Amino acid sequence: MDWVFSKWKPGRLQRWEFLLPPGSARETQTELESAISSPYLPRTNFPKANVFPEKFILEKANFRQALEILTRFPWVRDFRINLGKFYMSEDFSFSGLQESLRQASLLPNGWQIRFHPQSRGRAVASREELQILWEEAYGKIPIDSTIGNFTELNALCVGEDLILSLSLAGEPLFKHGGFAPLSKSAPIREDMARFLLSELKKILPDPDAVLVPFAGSGTFVWESAFHIFGLGFPHYDRSYVFEDLGEFPIATWEFLKRKISETAINKTVILWWNEKEADAASYLRERGSRFQEFLEKQRSGLQPPTLASSEKDFFSLSPREIWISLGKPAKIWMPLNPPYGLRIRQENVFDPYRQLAEILKEWRKLPAEIAGFLLCPDEASWSSFVRISGMETKTVHVTHGGIDLRVIYF
């Protein structure tokens, strides 16, 4: 097959894809409409957007406009450029595709492709068949390969057509760089955490303290700090494919970096975490030290956060004693995500959601504003919490690890 792609031109109006965490589309659509109608950058044309359950499409937008949208939605899971739709003839082959992408300056030197096949409906080729066709052209890439940087080429077969899109992110966007993951941990992804926290900010902006019980690997701790201090994709210590594209608008990227930083809270914020598992607590302490260094490097003009912690059982702690020890903060965020070990307890033995509802009643007695959310794995846990606590601002349905979650805000 003769693969031909248009030469990369950053000023050309193109079609861009932004992947979203499952369950975030409705709230994203409202903010997307606002971002398009009130852009940070000078308006040269009017982009259009279509929102789907797990992504949105930005059309008739140039590279700078796409970068602005990326920076304004820090929970985006991937950022792609649409390459087009191709007919899968009997002699179809991927041979020459990578070379054509490089000739068109869409795949910069130093970047390699990790192929991601998909098939939908009555497609002429299955995922396995697409993978075979790719390997016939380019061979297998070792899963643990560390040679060079990789970015994803998504190939979706629908009927007799193949829709191609190339990720301009490189590593998945939920990887914010610089931190090794906690082994034997399956934390909620950073993009999902950032989305949930963005909704929390609408309920209670500018918190004085963030309290994270059951902290695990600390995703809600770090993402809360990113959100509070106005940090996003331009700040992270990592590489992106789009930075290596020709005529990358460095000045625009720096402007967007400063613009989103204007949302930062310039006061000392307390980040308190609770984790009784020794390995996780040790990881949190080590990462907390490095995290402080990262924040100081990125936002030297702001007050650094105060880190505090407890390694006791959260259910045994006194809300008043914690509050007093932290200096009696007036506005508190409290994201709650009970660990798997608690979630699988039998209700007639120990119901963590009922217990959390009882504890939050005690927190509510304090002279402070408290807002947060609780991730519930099923209707029973959701109902138990609502019935006992009497609290519910709203409920958002999301998916994590293939499991539908009900996120109740209070």
Image (cartoon, rainbow, N blue to C red):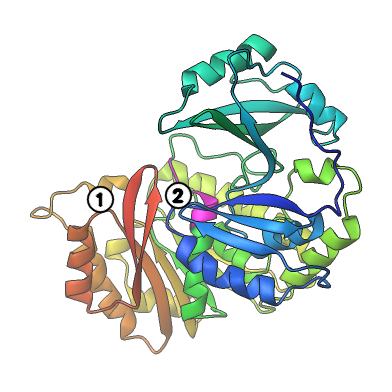
Would residue 26 be counted in the magenta stretch? no
Element at label 2:
loop
- Is the residue marked by circle 1 packed among few (<14), some (14-19), or many (20+) residues within 10 Å? some
Instruction: Give the mark nearer the N terminus: 2 vs 1.
Output: 2
Task: Please count the marks in the image.
Answer: 2
Instruction: Tell me where residue 79 appears, x and y as whole percent.
Output: 66, 48
Quadrant showing the C terminus: bottom left
Q: CA distance from mark 2 to mark 1?
A: 15 Å
Looking at the rendering, the stretch of residues picked out in magenta corresponds to 186-192
Which residue carries the number 1 mark? 343
Tell me which corner region of the image, top left, top right, bottom left or bottom right, holds residue 68: bottom right
Q: Quick one: label 2, few (<14), some, or many (20+) residues within 10 Å?
A: some
In screen coordinates, is 104 left or right of 137?
A: right
Residue 250 appears in which quarter of the rendering?
bottom right
Determine contact: label 2, label 1, CB under 8 Å. Answer: no
* Towards the viewer: 10 or 266: 10
Relative to 129, say whether 109 is above or below: below
Question: Which amino acid type corresponds to the residue marked 2 in the rendered image?
Answer: Ile
User: Residue at 43% of width from left, 41% of height from top?
Assistant: 186
Relative vertical location of residue 197 with respect to residue 219 in this rendering, above or below: below
Quarter holding residue 137: top right
**Residue 389 seen:** yes
Does residue 262 appear to the left or right of 197 in the view shown?
A: right
Would residue 140 be seen by someone viewing this image from the given angle?
Answer: no
Under circle 1, the secondary element is: helix
Question: Which residue position is annotated with label 2?
Answer: 188
Asked whether residue 190 is drawn in magenta, I would say: yes
Q: Position of residue 188 (x, y in %)?
A: 45, 49
Rendered residue at 49%/21% (across/down): 125
Q: Quadrant of the N terminus?
A: top right
The three-letter code of the residue at mark 1 reads Arg
